[in-house]
Amino acid sequence: MKLNWGTYAALMYLAFVAGMGYLVYRSTQEKIDLVITNYYEHDKLFPEKCEQQQNAIHLKEQVKITSGNPVTIQFYSAFPEKGTVQLYRPDNSFLDKTIDLTVDEKGAMHIESSSLKHGLWKVILQWESEGKKYYTEDRIFI
């Protein structure tokens, strides 16, 4: 069977349309998570966050976060009176967790990591000690 150039052009056009249709379908099935849903309010607090980071940087000894089972957060100075630990998963916002910051008498907090999915996590600490606010973040791999 011999085909002329018009038939080849029509087949190429149909293949292109089918390919584009497939790409549109696949793009609508892709899940896209925003890092922060309320980023305008978050950006308004940026100067305050910078000040809190500077407070944490100027501590005598930095907070140490150790991955493993359990994840250990060790405070050497500026023991928290109140605060939060946010476990942020960059690739899936449904896995994010926020935990109240409670330390033992040695200044350590232990978080059970067996319930956390393996991979990269961002640990965000916000706490208050003696009227001063602190902010620090670190990345761990579980």
Image: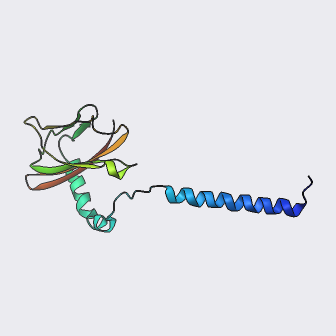
Judging depth in this view, the residue of 12 and 32 nearest the camera is 12
Instruction: Report x, y in % for residue 40.
Output: 32, 68
108 to the left or right of 9: left
Q: How many numbered markers are drawn?
A: 0
For the residue pair 134 and 119, the one nearer the viewer reads as 119
Q: Residue at x 33, y 51 (%)?
A: 94
Residue 31: percent from left, percent from top? 45, 55
Q: Position of residue 38 (x, y in %)?
A: 31, 65
Q: Which quadrant of the rendered structure holds the C terminus?
A: top left
Q: Residue at x 23, y 48 (%)?
A: 57
Is 9 placed left or right of 60 in the picture?
A: right
Pinpoint residue 29: horizontal percent, then vertical percent.
Answer: 50, 56
Choose between 88 and 125: the one closer to the eye: 88
The image quarter in which residue 37 lies: bottom left
Q: Which residue is located at x 9 percent, y 49 percent?
A: 81
42 vs 97: above or below: below
- Residue reaching furthest to the front: 1
Quadrant of res 116? top left
Extreme residue toward the right, this view: 2
Question: What residue is drawn where x is 78% and y is 59%?
Answer: 12
Location of residue 57 with respect to 40 vertically, above or below: above
Q: Quadrant of residue 10?
A: bottom right
